[in-house]
Amino acid sequence: MKAPRVTLEQWRTLQAVVDHGGFAQAAEATHRSQSSVSYTVARMQEQLGVPLLRIDGRKAVLTEAGEVLLRRSRQLVKQASQLEELAHHMEQGWEAEVRLVVDAAYPNARLVRALSAFMPQSRGCRVRLREEVLSGVDEVLLEGTADLAISSMSLPGYLGAELSTVEFIAVAHPDHPLHRLQRVLSVQDLESQLQVVIRDSGRTQPRDVGWLGAEQRWTVGSLPTAATFVGSGLGFAWLPRHLIERELRDGILKPLPLEHGGRRHPTFYLYANRDRALGPASQILVELIRRYDAEPLDTAEAPTVPC
């Protein structure tokens, strides 16, 4: 097989020129001289026999051939980086950090149990926990900035390990007009009332999930905020039972007597980053999450995991 004429470092240099908008910017980003960057790209074009960049004003712009080759090179450089990362992990034998992103609706109590059990086995491995809502979890995983993710969404191309379901209940304050009707409620009853919904934290393709039939809706940024609003008499919402167990017990919130759909049970899944192999620490954490997820959830204990 013929040896490549262009090195990975040369492809990285071309990517830097394009990503940072020019030779000077790429030189600053890569801590090299501008002349060195310019020579590297010129040498690449000579070796490949095709022009990769053209100067448009003061900016370097990809040629048609350059666009095709750069797109292919990104995957090549990514795979090389993954290979080097794998070798580093094999040498070290242990990860320095595990990045976990979790849907805010997943019970914190289960995570606390898993992480508490992980700590004495971690060998100093840090856990970076991030909380997102709905598609925000998927985005973090797909961007490659998480090693593990817990989501109720189905991710195309991923095989998730099935976890437990989380019960969502339609609730309102006992003095809310819907409860004053003192009968089974229909969709028409809900349509005239204020519904409190949780904002999807995803940036690219946020999704609306659940019933959104009320003409008036208030959107809030977190489940606890929604619970506070509804517990104060402002509207109704579907909220996780484990989050509002105390409010239900104390009579601050009361389930709505809906004829259909008063309770939902979405299933959660544990996903792993498919672009890198899980190290030993991540594998241990996966097993602990699955073990403690399978145990009964004591809703009386509702600790909060800081992010």
Image (cartoon, helix red, strand yellow):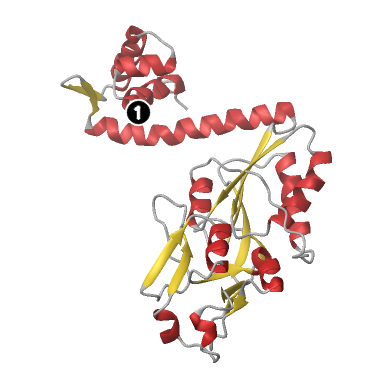
Q: Which residue is drawn at 44% across and 12% down?
A: 31
Q: Which residue is drawn at 36% across and 36% down?
A: 71
Compared with 301, 286 (above or below) is above
Is residue 247 at all visible to an observer of this figure?
A: yes
* Percent x, y of residue 283: 73, 46
Compared with 82, 37 (above or below) is above
Compared with 129, 217 (above or below) is below
Tell me the SS state at disc 1: helix
Mark 1 neighbour density, 10 Å: few (under 14) some (14–19) many (20 or more): few
Residue located farthest toward the left when viewing the structure as drawn: 57
The number of numbered badges drawn on the structure is 1
* Percent x, y of residue 154: 53, 62
Q: In this view, does 273 lie to the left or right of 31?
A: right
Quadrant of the snapshot with the C terminus: top right
Name the residue type under label 1.
Asp
Between 23 and 132, the residue placed more toward the observer is 132
* Percent x, y of residue 29: 41, 18
Q: Which residue is drawn at 53% across and 56% down?
A: 222
Between 291 and 215, the residue placed more toward the observer is 215
Q: Is residue 293 left or right of residue 210?
A: right
Compared with 231, 158 (above or below) is above
Is residue 165 at all visible to an observer of this figure?
A: no
The residue singled out by tag 1 in the image is 19
